Image (cartoon, rainbow, N blue to C red):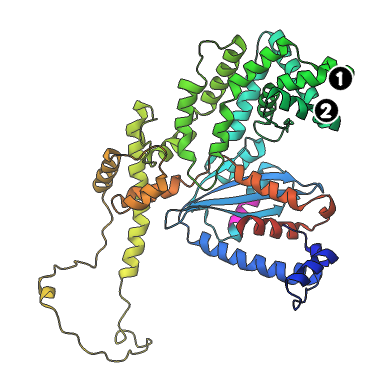
Amino acid sequence: MTPVYTVEKSSFRDLVKVLDPRYVMPSRKHFSKVELPRLYNACRAEVEKDVRSVVHYALTTDLWTSRAAQPYMSVTIHYISKDWILRARCLQTAYFPDDHTGAMIAQGLRDALETWGLQECHLVCVTTDNATNNISAMELNEWERLQCFGHRLQLAIENALKALTPASTKQAVERAVGVCKKVVSAFSNSWKRKRDLAKAQAVLGLPPHQLITETPTRWGSRQQMIERFLEQEKALSQVLLADKKARHLVPSWQDMVVLESLNTALGPLFEFIDALSGEKYVSVSFLKPVLHLFNNEILSQKDGDTELTKAIKEGILKYLNEKYDDHTTNNLLDMATLVDPRFKTAYMKEERVEFIKMRAAAELVDMAAPESAQTEAASISPPAAEDNPELPCPHPTKKTKKSLGSYFKKAGQGTTHSQPSRASIELELSMYLQAPGPDSETDPLEWWRQHELSFPSVARLAKKYLSIPATSSSSERAFSASGNIITCKRSCLKPNTVDQLVFLALNL
């Protein structure tokens, strides 16, 4: 967002005068003390109205330290609206000066839910990274937790590279990646080399792309750096060979073989992270199919793979399969896949299909019970005025004549709301599983919008599980917005102002 002090710049005031000479520009204080809180309160009231009507919701959360060395905690909420639209809202980017222990984070999250009037019993799952304090906080609150797929895949890659044997292979990888970093740094810090690189790209017919620098906190940035380096290798070597001071940076053929092996193993993986990081479409039900695709195609060993490529693929698969073999995580992902009409039971183990069906039916029975109780309570007529003298006597109304059909109405018909039986729920679930599914590229929420009346009970279960995000990217986006607000020139912003600005930037 544009800083408030922009309204004091003479150039901006001159622009406004050209647009409308009659407009009187308010002061900077007016915007910061009056307009910003007013806009924040109005936006917060709208968000609060939406989230209070949510039956089931999921969260993401993370911790971040600003440029001013101030710690913040972000909380985002994800839910499916009544018209089957997946919505994501940033609830807070709150100042969190307490120790980042599991107990303090757990209390901070409970306070955030209380502030927004959200009930813990409606919380389905919290998607977080694999930090120990976040895991401890979820255990203390007894909340379901899903490991962020982006963080988990990044850890799988790092673990596979660390586990390479013999030691000479690991050293060769470190050397090749180090050479790549040095070359990228040499071109990033020299305008002459950048100019020469552009000329070489034109001569060799290569795309005029800039080199990519690795960012440790950004998923896949190392692989992107290697991929771009391989793309521009001929142009880079030509420029380096012409520079006496940089000839030692020309990569050897051994380095190129290692980098190509790394790119072959890692290149296809990060497309899935980008696809699973969205917050406007269903992502959690893709995790089981993606893991199946990794095991049977993407990370399977192929003819022509080098020994290094095979070792990296094997290490990544071993790590992912171990981490996603957890019983609780398996149940959560299987339930999410079950209510996605594109997949249903296609990616479940055969021995787990009946168990997941029984679990789904039990959940549907539990979900139907409170609704039935509420409906019965609402249908109870209030006491008559003559039975309760404290109630005001209503005005006499004209007696309506009975219709002929009213004499044939069965006793209790239309006034009782029986709870769906276990048998009827199992029948509906069976009919849903037997119904033809849509194409894999179809939006499952659009399918449910059209078939909600056919499978009303299963639809409630779909709204519960399909709202879970597969990654914690939403919290990362909140911190990106925070970083754009807390710049070098605005590092003294008060935490409350930062929270308001980030909230508006992500929710308006």
Residue plotted at (66% across, 56% down): 505
Residue 206 horizontal/vertical position (percent): 68, 26
Q: Secondary structure beneath disc 2?
A: helix
- What is the total number of numbered labels drawn onto the structure image? 2
Q: Quadrant of residue 224?
A: top right
Tag shown at residue 243: 1
Q: Secondary structure beneath disc 1?
A: loop
Q: Quadrant of the N terminus?
A: bottom right
Residue 97 horizontal/vertical position (percent): 76, 50
Q: Quadrant of the C terminus?
A: bottom right
Please tell me whether residue 335 is drawn above or below residue 247 in the rendered image: below
Q: Quadrant of residue 117?
A: bottom right
Residue 93 among magenta residues: no
Label whose residue precedes the other's in the sequence (2 or 1): 2
Q: Which residues are magenta?
A: 108-113
In the image, what residue type sits under mark 1?
Answer: Asp
> Marks 2 and 1: CB-CB under 8 Å?
yes
Residue plotted at (26% across, 50% down): 421
Q: Main secondary structure of the magenta part?
A: helix
* Residue that extends furthest to the bottom in the rendered view of this protein: 396
* Residue that extends furthest to the right in the rendered view of this protein: 245
In the image, what residue type sits under mark 2?
Answer: Arg
The residue that disc 2 covers is 193
The answer to whether residue 22 is visible is yes
Judge by depth and name the residue closer to the eye, 62 or 416.
62
